[in-house]
């Protein structure tokens, strides 16, 4: 049962009621939604996995793969490191206080928006600092030279200075 406007929004009502019921998932988040979450993508987030009722507990297990089109925090070059990660969540229709945990996914009215789930997981899995490569030398704060391309001759340039902090 899918929403025509948003194929990533699915009803889990029948899954919740039938033990051992499985629903395969093969979805792609649209560009608009990805941008809405502040993560433009060169390859849109793809979800492959399943929703499974395991003895009355609804589990979502999926692999998220995409190529975010981010910008390096140090040198402003494109940083497009492919992401491929597995996630699993327990789907609940209402939260109890002890379920206030990222492991639990709330599906109000038994509706689950898998695009929302994927984008939230993706955002949490991305490093806080985006780098084009782990040893990016950045742009010289004195002369503006991209030090990955060519070293500059400034003496006291601080290699660890990030553009975000200046
Ligand atoms: Zn860089
Ligand atoms: Zn310089």
Image: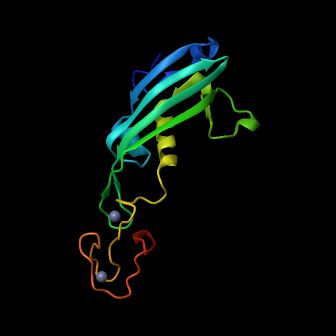
Decide: is 144 above or below 127: below
Query: Which image quadrant shows ligand 2?
Result: bottom left
Closer to the camera in the image, 125 or 166:
125
Give the residue furthest to the top.
18
What residue is at 34 percent from the left and 70 percent from the top? 138
Q: How is the image coloured?
A: rainbow
Q: Is residue 57 visible?
A: yes
Closer to the camera in the image, 119 or 155:
155
- In the rendered image, residue 97, in percent from the top left (x then y), is placed at 75, 37
Give the residue furthest to the right.
97
What residue is at 33 percent from the left and 83 percent from the top? 142
Decide: is 58 above or below 81: above
- In the rendered image, residue 13, in percent from the top left (x then y), is placed at 59, 17
Tally of numbered discs: 0
What residue is at 29 percent from the left and 77 percent from the top? 144
What residue is at 67 percent from the left and 40 percent from the top? 101
Query: Residue 141 lies in what quarter of the image?
Result: bottom left
Give the residue furthest to the left.
150
Query: Residue 14 lies in what quarter of the image?
Result: top right
Closer to the camera in the image, 139 or 137:
137
Decide: is 79 above or below 110: below
* Image quarter (top left, top right, bottom left or bottom right) of the C terminus: bottom left
Decide: is 66 above or below 50: below
- In the rendered image, residue 18, in percent from the top left (x then y), is placed at 62, 11
Query: Residue 160 lies in what quarter of the image?
Result: bottom left
8 left or right of 154? right
Q: Is residue 7 visible?
A: no
């Amino acid at each position: 049962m899918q929403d025509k406007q948003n194929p990533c929004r699915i009803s889990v009502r029948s899954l919740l009621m039938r033990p051992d019921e499985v629903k395969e998932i093969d979805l792609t988040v649209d560009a608009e939604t990805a941008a809405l979450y502040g993560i433009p993508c060169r390859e849109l987030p793809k979800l492959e996995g399943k929703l499974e009722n395991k003895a009355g507990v609804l589990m979502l297990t999926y692999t998220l793969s995409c190529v975010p089109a981010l910008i390096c925090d140090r040198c402003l070059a494109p940083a497009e490191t492919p992401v491929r990660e597995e996630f699993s969540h327990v789907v609940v229709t209402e939260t109890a206080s002890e379920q206030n945990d990222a492991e639990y996914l709330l599906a109000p009215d038994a509706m689950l928006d898998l695009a929302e789930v994927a984008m939230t997981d993706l955002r949490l899995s991305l490093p806080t600092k985006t780098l084009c490569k782990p040893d990016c030398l950045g742009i010289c704060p004195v002369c503006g030279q991209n030090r990955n391309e060519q070293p500059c001759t400034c003496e006291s340039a601080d290699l660890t200075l990030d553009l975000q902090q200046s």
